[in-house]
Structures are given as C-alpha cells and as structure tokens.
Amino acid sequence: MKEHFLKRLIGFGLIIDIIIFDQLSKWLIMEYALRPNLQEQTLGLFEWFANGDRLPFTRIEILPFFNLVMVWNEGISFGLFQDGGVTFLVIVTSLIAGLFAIWLSRATTWLQAISLGMVIGGAIGNVIDRLHFGAVVDFLDFHAFGWHYPAFNVADSCITIGIALLVFDGVFLEPKRTKNTA
C-alpha cells in the first residue's frame, strides 16, 4: 500500500516539477536569449506572466544543426488543428490530462507513474501557454541539410518521452506482468 502511494506521489510531484521547469525555460529563453536579439528590454518573471505580448519570429544559430527560435504554435503537435481555437484546445487538452490523472491515481508500476506524470505535466505546461499567449511557445529548432524538425519546447519533450514510455510499457512489459500473474 505504501509503495502505491509513493508511486502516485512521485507521479503527481513530477507534474508540478515539469510545469515549473517548462515555464521557467520558456521565460528564460524568451527574455534572456530571444528578446535581447530583438533589441528589446527583458521582462522579469512576474512581468512576463502579467504580459501576454507575443514576440515576433527570431532565430539565433547556436550550432550548425541547432537554433533557438521564437515560434508560436496555435495548433497541437506539429502545428495540427491550428484552426481549432484556443478554447477548444484548452478544453480538450485539459480533459485528456484529467483522464491521464485518473490513470495516474491508479498506476501500478513506477514506469506508468513517471510516464503519466511527464505527459500530464507537459500538457498542463502547454495549456498555461495557451491561456497566457493564445498559443504555445516553441523555441528548440533542430535541422540538417535544409530539413527542420518542427520547433518544440520542454513540455513537448516530456509529452513525447512519456507517451513513448507508456507504449513501451504496454507493448513489452505489461504482457510479461500479465503472464507472471496468470
């Protein structure tokens, strides 16, 4: 019983950690890397949260294959559903995060708890952006030979890794657990 509680506690704690890290990374990149590149005055954390202004597109080359960019994603992953509207996307994302939170409250393995915490934390981080700016802040741009992977952020990374781990758990580990209990 204690271990089940600890798994859930770690999963829900991870949600909070990811939200904080995601929002701080967006603030730091926007205000201390991208805004100075536009010759604009930086905003402190509380000013940034109070200000919903969007920065225009800008790009800073860091490595031959990596840029910091200012991109506003008004859709979901890879810019899908850009015409869905902020309210629709916030509601759908919040409902999905709520369903995943119910799953997290019933998680039976550490991998499930951590994976679900990552997905929920990332989803809420992006919902905060939608409520704050009307779009998600994306700033990581990897590219090679003229091909650019869609820009993304910390929340997107957590969602992607969390879903990959859930799929791995469901495909490879769950059948072994089921077989061992049968």
Image (spheres, grey):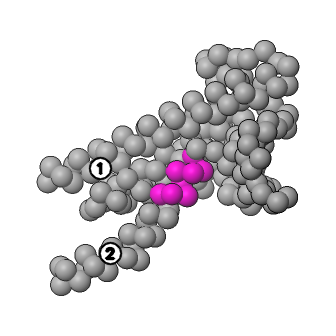
Mark 1, residue position: 8
Looking at this view, name the residue that lies furthest to the left.
Answer: 1
Which quarter shows the N terminus? bottom left
Residue 35, by quadrant, is: top right
Q: Position of residue 10 (x, y in %)?
A: 31, 45
Mark drawn on residue 88: none
Q: In screen coordinates, is 40 left or right of 178?
A: right
Tell how many labels: 2
- Identified at 84% across, 36% down, the residue is 58
Q: Residue at x 23, y 83 (%)?
A: 179
Front-lying residue, 45 or 96: 45
In the image, residue 136 sits, relative to residue 21, either above or below, namely below
Tell me the distance, in whole angstroms, between the alpha carbons under discs 2 and 1: 18 Å
Give me the residue at 18% from left, 79% from top: 181
Question: Disc 2 marks which amino acid?
Answer: Glu
The residue beneath circle 2 is 174
Q: Is residue 69 found left or right of 117 in the rendered image?
A: right
Q: Which residues are magenta?
A: 155-162
User: Percent x, y for residue 67?
Assistant: 75, 42
- Give me the residue at 43% from left, 70% from top: 168
Decide which of 100, 15 is in the foreground and name it. Answer: 15
